[in-house]
Amino acid sequence: LTSIERIEIYAQAYTARLVEVLRGEFPALAATLGPDLFTRFALGYLSRHPSTSYTLGVLGQAFPEDLAATR
């Protein structure tokens, strides 16, 4: 693989990990929406609120407000 391809794999894995963190933080919402719709909402949230903390514990802090404002 080229260096660009390796970086793309890392970026996709990192994003998938962030979505899984949100899924774990909001399990009832994830179950209600289903995996595809929850992932779309989570990706939208992450694009508007990228992780800026060294801990993932605050990743979903603004997720409810973001959903209320955008959905």
Image (cartoon, rainbow, N blue to C red):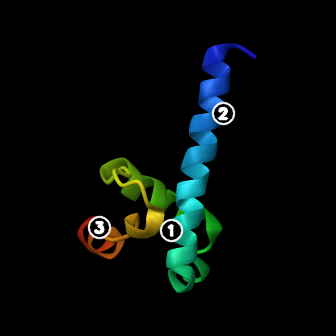
Q: Earlier in the sequence, mark 3 or mark 2?
A: 2
Q: Earlier in the sequence, mark 2 or mark 1?
A: 2
Q: Residue at x 46, y 62 (%)?
A: 56
Say what amino acid the circle numbered 1 marks. Leu
State the SS at label 1: helix
- Label 1: how many Cα within 10 Å (few below 14, some 14–19, many 20+): many
Q: Residue at x 38, y 52 (%)?
A: 51
Q: Give the farthest residue toward the bottom.
A: 28
Hey, which quadrant is residue 9 in on the image? top right
Give the label on residue 66, or none. 3
Say what amino acid the circle numbered 3 marks. Asp
Q: Earlier in the sequence, mark 1 or mark 3?
A: 1
Residues at circles 1 and 3 in contact by the CB criterion of under 8 Å:
no
Q: Quadrant of the C terminus?
A: bottom left
Hey, which quadrant is residue 67 in on the image? bottom left
State the SS at label 2: helix
CA separation, marks 3 and 2? 27 Å
- Mark 1, residue position: 22
Say what amino acid the circle numbered 2 marks. Ile
Of badges 3 and 2, the one in the foreground is 2
Q: Nearer the viewer, residue 54 or 31?
A: 54
